[in-house]
Amino acid sequence: MFDVGFSELCLIGLVSLLVIGPERLPKVARLAGFWLGKTRSMVASVKEEIKLELQAEELRQIFKEQSGIAEVQQIIDETSDTLKSTIDPLPTTSRAQDDLDAGAVPEPEQHREQLPTDITTEQHEPK
């Protein structure tokens, strides 16, 4: 806080010795030390209270963020349930479902009618 070196302290001691006198100097030094200690403890107490308030505010912000995360999770769950309810009613045969569960890929050719592979072209004569 203050940059007071040894030479400045010696100068303050010499001036106080001359102004206050040798008889009252020890009593004044004790009183100054007492008030200096009280001031330091009060400053430390205020610092600790500020630190605790900052930590409490950080916790409030974390709880607020966590509640926001819970709301997002609830929306995701609702959307997932809605999607599942719309997908589940789709008709599937038990064999097709068993094949899908087993990992088989359905072949689209099975459900189509066989188309003729040889195409004959008829030639029309002009009239």
Image: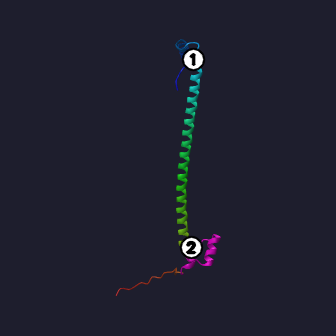
Cα separation, mark 2 vs mark 1, equals 85 Å
Say what amino acid the circle numbered 1 marks: Phe
48 vs 35: above or below: below
- Given residues 14 and 65, the one toward you in this image is 14
Which x, y percent locates residue 71? Answer: 53, 59
Of tags 2 and 1, which is closer to the observer?
A: 1
Residue that numbered label 1 is attached to:
6
Residue that numbered label 2 is attached to:
88
Say what amino acid the circle numbered 2 marks: Asp
Q: Residue furthest right?
A: 102
Picture residue at 54% right of the left edge, 62% below the top: 74
- Mark 2 and mark 1 lie on one chain; the one further toward the N terminus is 1
Q: Residue furthest left?
A: 127
* Label 1 packing within 10 angstroms: few (<14), some (14-19), many (20+): few
Residue 81 in magenta stretch: no
Which residues fall within the magenta stretch?
Answer: 90-113
